[in-house]
Image: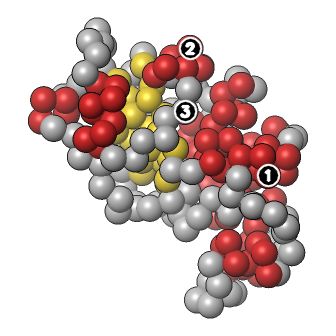
Amino acid sequence: MIELSPIVACICEGGAETAIIDMLVDADRLVFSRERMLNEEVIRCRNGKEFEQRYLRKGFESKITILRVLDSHSEGFRLSTAYEHKVDVIKVVTSPEIEMLLILAEGKYNEYMKKTSVMSPSSFCKQVLKLKGNIKSQAYIRSYFADIDMLISTIREYKRVRSLKRGEVYLADLLK
């Protein structure tokens, strides 16, 4: 199981990721509670220096774990040396895109894998699965995954079929 500090700063890349974390934390399905979250909310600040200025300049008695939920393996997040020892940064990668959860939920992962060289997950969802609307929006994700157990099984399936680089974790690793 993943080790977290008493305070968890959960930074999400977009609305879909934010909705997923909010849904899971509100359903008490994550290894941390909303009360442990910095400001008790998902943070939408992707720049390390900006995060440092907005959140780390407060006095914290303990270390902070920063969970960065994003689809990039290489996006940087640099903090000044004054704060590096006060935080642990963990990348929670949803590569290639959060839409992979929709593809898995629809049972179309193998079909998508045959088209990866010509189609992004987002395009596959719209063109092949015929999903309508803003599939990356919080409202869409909340509606699509209204059944929290379906969301959790999809997240676990994602971990089963994907591989990550060293030092990265899956959404599934944050589940109880």
Looking at the rendering, in which quadrant would you find the C terminus?
Answer: top right
**Where's residue 113, x and y in %?**
67, 80
- Whether 38 is drawn above or below 73: the answer is above
**Pointer 3: what residue?**
42
The amino acid on which the numbered mark 2 sits, given as a three-letter code, is: Glu
Q: Earlier in the sequence, mark 3 or mark 2?
A: 2
The amino acid on which the numbered mark 3 sits, given as a three-letter code, is: Val
The residue depicted at 73 percent of the width and 78 percent of the height is 124
The amino acid on which the numbered mark 1 sits, given as a three-letter code, is: Tyr
Neighbor class of circle 2 (other Cα within 10 Å; few <14, some 14-19, many 20+) is few
Circle 3: element type? loop
> Dividing the picture into quarters, in which one does residue 110 lie?
bottom right
**Pointer 1: what residue?**
140
Q: Earlier in the sequence, mark 1 or mark 2?
A: 2
**Pointer 2: what residue?**
35
The residue depicted at 67 percent of the width and 64 percent of the height is 100
| Distance in Å between CA atoms under marks 1 and 2 | 26 Å
- Whether 115 is drawn above or below 130: the answer is below
Neighbor class of circle 1 (other Cα within 10 Å; few <14, some 14-19, many 20+) is some
> Is 96 left, or right, of 58 in this rendering?
right
**Where's residue 7, x and y in %?**
42, 19
